[in-house]
Image: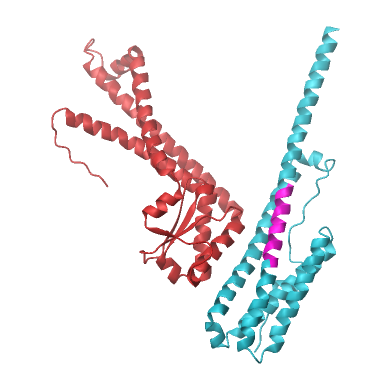
Chain colours: A cyan, B red
Amino acid sequence: MGPVLIVLGVLLAAALVLIMFVVGIYNRLVGLRNRYKNSFAQIDVQLKRRNDLIPNLVETAKGYMKHERETLEGVIQARNQAVSAGQRAAADPGNADAMNQLNGAESMLSGALGKLFALSEAYPDLKANQNMLALQEELTSTENKIAFARQAFNDSVMRYNTQRETFPAIMFAGMLNFQEAQLFEVANPDEREAPKVSF
Amino acid sequence: MDFFEHQEVARRRTGLLVFLFVLAVVLIVVTICTVVGIAISLTNDSDVNVDLLTRFVGTIQQNWFVFLAVAGGTIAVIFLGSLYKVSQLASGGQVVAELLGGRLVAPGGGDLAERRLLNVVQEMAIASGIAVPPVYVLENEDGINAFAAGFEPDSAVVSVTRGALDRLSRDELQGVIGHEFSHILNGDMRLNVRLIGLIHGILVIALVGYYVLRSLGHVRISSNKK
């Protein structure tokens, strides 16, 4: 009876150690997954902020750029499309199609804004307007924040994926339902080019 | 070599330098013990015919308790000296910024240059994944300079001079602030405070020696305090 008991005891101890080990892996992966989900939400915060700043910008510019209706209306249209794309993506976060449409709308808005700012170079009165300067600074900052939020998102996705793919976590990742996370990448190669502005 | 490889090389170099620093402290303790040992061997006139080295080894063997006390005392002096300095410096970054004449930039307001500075700091905080630190401006400084102070990332502050605010473009300001954030993120400030503490601890030994020599009879000593 003695040796059987000892063997059973050792097996039980080994099983307990294995379970604790797997629990540790699981908890670590959960923590990293939540972190990259949070990073993704931060991008949305900046996108919304940009959408909110734009109507004010267009109103300020309208007074000075009376003959540039097309450009101004282009900005408003792009902004409205970005807002609705954002709402659709928020309603269905897992949908890759909605995500792609959102990215497309956002980059179109970036292009339209770039055109507006380049055009405003030709209107010195508008350039000197304090309100315009403040708005321009806020929008530039928001564009940068969007870019950095995407960068931070990619960093946290990288950390999660690395932790998930290393040994020994990789052995249990599949059975614990931890999928590989997607980095934010420029889907459309055209988006890599800066918007061309011609007068 | 890409960005991450540069990071790893820098971290390895820092590790090596810290190791060499600790080695230097150990060698100081060993040197002091050796000096004490030689002094004891010289005054130990039990066997004048034996050479100094044998006497030295013999002294260590006979008086190992004394050496333990000397080594322990030296380490204690260094440790207490560094502890004092560290507790002085670790009171938070805001103390340092205000000591240097910095003015806190209010989070909401400010003129265009200050708004730009606050925005740049927020951008870097997003990029590095840490909280936005308080921002100070050194109004009286015309040159271009910046620093980060504080013991922990939570109590860190970032400060720039008036000259930096006025003369740098937005991209240049972003680069400078990013550099300061890397100091916060990599724990450089904590490392610096600890190293300053250790140096102070070593200096305490010199101070002890200075006072001992002075009290031995009003000896004129010229000291080079840099």
Q: Residue at x 59, y 55 (%)?
A: B128
Residue B216 sits above or below residue B17 on the image: above
Measured from the top left, where is residue A61 in percent x and y? 62, 84
Residue furthest to the bottom in view is A67
Could you tell me if residue B1 is visible in this image?
no
Question: Which residue range is magenta in the image?
Answer: A33-48
Place residue B125 in its image quadrant: bottom right
**Which secondary structure dominates the residues rendered in magenta?**
helix
Q: Quadrant of the N terminus of chain B?
A: bottom right
Q: Nearer the viewer, residue A48 or A94?
A: A48
Q: Nearer the viewer, residue B20 or A46?
A: A46
Could you tell me if residue A16 is visible in this image?
yes
Report the number of discs.
0
Residue B128 as seen in the image, left or right of residue A83 = left
Residue B153 as seen in the image, left or right of residue A177 = left
Measured from the top left, where is residue B57 in percent x and y? 33, 17
Magenta-colored stretch includes residue A43? yes
Residue A75 as seen in the image, left or right of residue A141 = right
Q: Nearer the viewer, residue A155 or A132?
A: A132
Place residue A92 in its image quadrant: bottom right
Measured from the top left, where is residue A81 in percent x and y? 78, 74
Measured from the top left, where is residue B173 in percent x and y? 50, 66
Q: Residue at x 78, y 25 (%)?
A: A16
Residue A77 sits above or below residue A101 on the image: below
Residue A193 as seen in the image, left or right of residue A134 = right
Q: Nearer the viewer, residue B121 or B104?
A: B104
Q: Residue at x 69, y 56 (%)?
A: A153
